[in-house]
Amino acid sequence: MNLVSLGTPLLALELTLNSGQAFHWKREGHGWLGAIGEAAVYLEQRNGELFVNAGAESAASNYLALDHPLEEIAASFPKDPVTQEALSFCHGMRILRQPRWEALATFITSSMKQVAHIAQISHTLRQRFGRPLDWEGRSMHTYPSPEALGALSEADLRACALGYRAANLLASAQRIASGDTDLDRIAELPDAEAQMALRNLPGVGEKVANCALLFGFERLKAFPVDVWIERVIRVRYFRKRQKVTPATIRAFCSKSFGPYGGYAQQYLFHHARLTWKKG
């Protein structure tokens, strides 16, 4: 096993890969095996030192966003107890810099699904329609391209447990494959315009658009509001006030968490998801 050290960055590897941002990384020995774009990648962390398979150093550094200034990001968070609890719980978590199509498509399939179900769908799509990869005799698959998915039928996708999401994923893939929607062009737009452009795609509402912006377009202020975040804000910040509307919650989130609101969102989401289940 030919591994290369990437030093000791401020990074909680397992927390980052297993926090509901990406959905295909699997435990392999003492590390994690997955695909970054078209490359097979193995990641391992020992006593804070990060290792990656030789040849994947640049891809791994970029994907893990090792250039994000985590200390500066943490210092920008509100000092209230709720955010600080989440920050402490998620210390070292980074927002991944994922391929745009992969992030968008994954969250199109996420509607009304739990993390484990989204991961199951992701693995099924990869195994059936992605390109096979190999590392040290271990197999994995890329996420299927818009062209690959766009050439399928809705029945093909429904057979992957997508349900009604199949039609949305198929139509979005076809629009991107045809050039009708250009993700590279969207990446050049300001945040609000990029969100509106993404929302023109089937199955992409405000929450999915913000997830795509945060995890695929590196818009670190984007603040997706899902069921967990709405619960956190309603219960911890508004103390169950009866007349708090979803619009009020979205407005509060947009203005309260600063230029790195997406990081705060992910910390709040992951902290609530893991601790609230335990009461």
Image: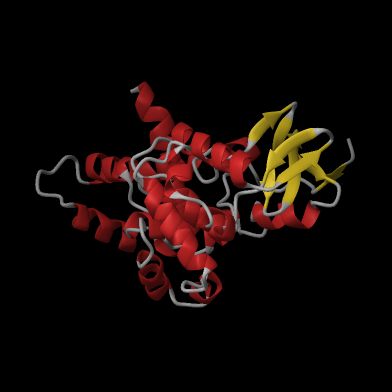
The quadrant the N terminus occupies is: top right
Is residue 265 visible in the rendered image? The answer is no
The residue furthest right is: 2
Q: Position of residue 130 (x, y in %)?
A: 64, 47
- Which residue is at 32% across, 58% downward? 205
- How many labels were placed on the picture? 0
39 to the left or right of 256: right
Q: Left or right of 11: which side holds 231?
A: left
Q: Is residue 153 visible?
A: yes
Residue occupying image coordinates x 51% and y 37%: 119
Determine the image quadrant of residue 139.
top right
Q: Quadrant of residue 253?
A: bottom left
Outermost residue on the top side: it is: 278
The image position of residue 168, as x and y in percent, is 38, 54
Drawn side of residue 62 relative to residue 182, left or right: right
Is 70 drawn above or below residue 237 in the view shown? Answer: below
Is 25 placed left or right of 236 in the picture?
Answer: right
